Image (spheres, rainbow, N blue to C red):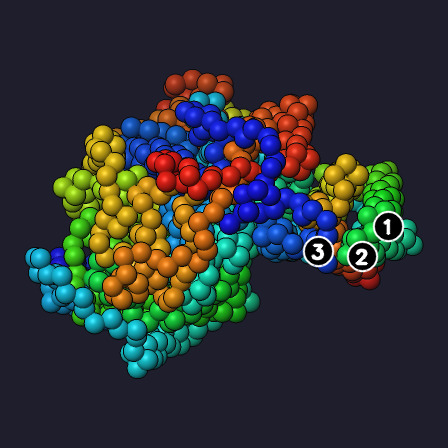
Amino acid sequence: MKRLLPLMTGLVLLLTACGREDLSTLNPQGPVAEKQFELMKLSIGIMTLVVVVVFAICIYVLIRFRRKKGDKAIPKQVEGNHKLEVIWTVIPIILLLILGVPTIQNVFGFAKDYSKDKDAVQVKVTAHQYWWEFEYTDYGITTAQDLIVPTGKKISFELAAADVKHSFWIPAIGGKMDTNPGSTNRMFLEFPKEGVFRGKCAELCGPSHALMEFKAKAVSPESFDRWVAAMKAPAVMPADAELAEKFTAQCLSCHAVGENGGNSAPNLTGLGSRETVAGILFNDEGGGIEQHLKDWITDPQKVKKGAMMPGAQDFDLTQEEIAGIAKYLAEYKLDY
Amino acid sequence: MSAHNHVEGHLPHEPEKATLEARNKILGFWLFLGAEVVLFGTLFAAFLALRHNIGDGPAAAELFQLPMIFAATMILLTSSLTSVFAVQAMHRHNKKSMVVWLIITILLGLGFLGLEIYEFWHYASEGHRFSTSAFSSSFYTLVGFHGAHVAFGVLWISLVIGQVFKKGLTVVTAPKVYISAMYWHFIDVVWVFIFTVVYLMGKVAG
Amino acid sequence: MAAAHAHGHKVKRYSGLMDWLTTVDHKKIGILYLIAGLFFFLIGGLEAVIIRIQLLKPMNDVVAGDTFNELITMHGTTMIFLAAMPLLFALMNAVIPLQIGARDVAFPFLNSLGFWTFFFGGLLLNLSWFAGAVPDAGWTSYVPLAGEYYSSGHGVDYYVLGLQIAGIGTLLGGINFMATIINMRAPGMTFMRMPMFTWAIFITSALIVFAFPALTVGLVALMFDRLFNANFFDVANGGNGVLWEHIFWVFGHPEVYILILPAFGIISEVVSTFSRKRLFGYSSMVFATVLIAFLGFMVWAHHMFTTGLGPVANGLFSIATMLIAVPTGVKIFNWLFTLWGGSIRFNTASLFAIGFIPTFVMGGVTGVMLASAPADYQYHDTYFVVAHFHYVIVGGLVLGIFSGLHYWWPKMFGRVLNEKLGQVTFWTFFIGFHMTFFIQHFLGLLGMQRRVYTYLGGQGFDNMNFISTIGAFLMGIGTIAFVINIFITWAKPRNASNDPWEDGRSLEWTIPSPPPEYNFKQTPLVRGYDAWWKEKMEGKTAMTPAEPVGSIHMPSPSILPFFMSIGLFIAGFGFMYDHLIVAGAGLAITLVCMAIRSLVDDHGFHIEPEDQDKEVQA
């Protein structure tokens, strides 16, 4: 117990600028996360005060009133103290009021609906087992896993789930909101700084819940416009006609590139520009994007158990063809 | 402290409360009814949340036939009244009268159940089955649970009647009569809520 | 009086295994709950250790994602329903009738039934491991993940039916203890003269009576969806997954107060006894406990802040949740001021109680932090929440249970637990606990979600997870030390005195350790709060009796509760595996036993004065 007192005091200091810029709630990179961090600091401050008072009394009492060996004396039996009861009822109420006011202010503030705001970017997020779909309803484009957003604008999210309950969370930018099957939720975030921020699924959704990561990439508004344009550009298919045919037949019944293909699996347009394959295999680690794509297409279950994507044994694709598709996708970059 | 199982001679005025064991049972049963209130309350909450989600099935307004439901309600309410008469007879130490009223009570209960079974069978033929929709699942669970409670009550009171025949009206059998009557009143009160929330509100809301 | 009891029938008295299977004696039932609760605590602890081993380092592969989800589900469900609650029921059974001067609970038969249904429900749930179909949707079993489509195996069925059966037992226990405390207090013991532990159990029992039926309905709905094609939660047919959340948490939040209020009661007893002072602010403590219980029903949606209920709901539930901190704080200060001015004796029991106070406060303050909905948008479903609830449940409830067990062990078993081993238990468990869970607050804030079977490297989570795992091993060592303590104490002679701590304040310390079968030869007369202390301070060496020595009526043992529970157990399997005949047969066994119980009168038996002084073992 004596150890914990300095630890708790250090806690408040520790909280300032702690953790990764792209991931920590204690290192907020956007106004929503910042306000939430302020609330956290306020509540920790108040609670540290409470803890310090309790610990101080506790430590004092244990030292001052410990029984001396062989002491048979009966201490004075005290029934209570009305004044003290009032004090330790009223003071906590006041402390709670201090916390309560910004709580109410923020709970309404964060609930603001920007879905009709013309300046906001509308994104419909659909959570799947185990990937994230992002549809930009104003622009008519859909992407997956990497959420590209412009800085300095309100991003208005409509959150939905395709299968089970998930939860959409970008810790460095703001708090999370669940995606419920059968209904939609609304949330907004803002990204003042450019950068790549990590996103997580925050609701148990199956065996690969831990692997359902996504990235939020904030770019300048001009860059964002270029990205939108690049996404809308006609699809780039594999150069080799035979490979393109195989790709269309085997992959595009579920996936899409540009205007070609289905929409039940992640959109593959510009896959080469994304940070990862499958949300968790980083391009700059362990073999690179082409190898990751080969591994993924060959055996998705090895990477993400329970993934809905069939494995290579269910496809009519040779190792060569898989390598070819992997190369094509790795080189399918968007210029923005 | 010892509890007498039977008092030679005189039966006390309220025989159901004559022993500590009996008073414990009555108190315990009130507490159980408190739990049942929460149970049915939760079933009602689920029903209220889901009652408009009728899927492919018929809606409440077109399904429910109020005249028959009203008849069932009257039957059940009357059966509550007859169970009151039974307890009153018990307080007058009139075993015969008590048993007669109890028998009438369970006959009315069986009548209610008969109507309800017919009602469910009829709904099923109208396309309102257990699996049809969220509305139908919650309807059958709520109303069905109540019906199961009525059925259990009928069995229970029958067993109590049997015991009174065999052992007479004593400080041991009296609490059983009293508690089964408490139970019976409870399921009647629940039915009043079902009649209102499920049937009346269903007809009105459309 | 003895002459009137010419019932003439021979009462069966069992021994050995049959004695334990048929007992309706609260003291024996308490021991049964203790053994079963400890057994399940060890299972849940093993599950925890495997979880922590898997999380020792990033991308570890000790267990795969699906097995991990089974482990966390079983760990949570087992610890809450099959370990914590039964251990509390063990203490409730062992202590409450003694504290109120009663000879047993109001419904001894139901008491036994409560134990056996809990036992068979817990057994059913854990048989899932052997059936290869383990529930894996978390102890909260959210739909549609737990529904018939996404959990198409039998795993979740084991959860539904196991808990349903075990829950019956808990509900019966709640009714039993409420009736006992209302109707069976010794003469002179008004409500405001009851020990604080008794008050805590009384209020907890009320919580049980009003919270468990909500769980019953939720489980019924989920069972109907999974087994009978109902559509409560099937979105495609108009069902609603958020409805499950509401129903579950309307139960789930009071459940955590069901867990902690008894611990509060234990702390009040232990702190008071080992500082030789009466509890400071008794009436405030009673009022605060009632208020906590009442408010506990108004805050359930703080588990759903991110579900999307809207700012009005989130705001209201935030404020309501914060309010609970007020009565809880009142209790903390009253304990501190009980210690203040006292003569504090440190032993294992009091160390656990004293360790509870700052630890629970830490858990409570993170609770207030979580109460603020907009901040909770960051905390929810992260390790911050995991840290919070382990602080209050383990650092609160479990420390309280350890304290209560060490405190009342001599009363239950006639032997005092070994003090040296007790110290080992306390220090390893306490240090290990803080090591495991304090650091998890930071993990959550730094971006680690909960219920993740692994985590990618390079996020800054590695070292903290490592430390947390080491702490878990320490806790395991502490637990093993406690189990060893039980065994070596069992071998010691049974020679504890009535009042082995010498400073006992309440009625249980006025009778032998362990008590005779009938508890009190003569029901005592209570003349004030801290009934025994009051007599001691006036120089008395025993309680004044409230009745003459006489024939004591005892309830008969019965094998029916055991069979009723087996019936439910069989029915559970029948429903799960779609053998409705088996299900029907199981239910029939239970119903027939109920009928037998109703039709065959239990006359009980008597212990005559000449037998009352023999060593009738508990």
Residue C287's disc is: none
Separation of marks 3 and 2 at Cα, in angstroms: 10 Å
**Mark 1 nearby-residue class (10 Å; few <14, some 14–19, many ≥20):** some
Residue at screen point 52% across, 58% down: C182
Considering the numbered disc 2 on the image, is that residue within a helix, a strand or a loop? Answer: loop
Q: Which residue is mark 1?
A: B97
Residue C418 visible in the displayed image: yes
Q: Quadrant of residue B116?
A: top right
Residue where numbered disc 3 is placed: B12
Say which residue appears at 77% left-offset and 36% top-offset: B166
- Label 2 – label 1 distance at C-alpha: 9 Å
Residue at the image point whose x is 49% and y is 20% from the top: A314
Which chain is indicated by disc 3?
A: B
* Subunit under mark 2: B
Q: Position of residue C574 (x, y in %)?
A: 61, 26
Whether tag 2 and tag 1 are in contact, CB under 8 A, the answer is: yes
Separation of marks 3 and 1 at Cα, in angstroms: 18 Å
Q: Is residue C22 above or below residue C518?
A: above
Front position among marks 3 and 2 = 3
Q: Secondary structure at mark 1?
A: helix
In contact (CB < 8 Å): disc 3 and disc 1? no
Task: Pinpoint residue B95: horizontal percent, then vertical percent.
Answer: 82, 48
Q: Amino acid at mark 3?
A: Pro
* x 52%, y 69%: residue: C312
Q: Is residue C145 above or below residue A122?
A: above
Q: Which residue is mark 2?
A: B92
Under mark 1, the amino acid is Ser
Which type of secondary structure does the marked residue at label 3 adopt? loop
Crowding near the residue tagged with mark 2, few <14, some 14–19, many ≥20 C-alpha atoms within 10 Å: some
Question: Mark 2 vs mark 1: which is more N-terminal?
Answer: 2
**Among all residues in the image, which is located at the extreme bottom?**
A83
Amino acid type indicated by mark 2: Arg
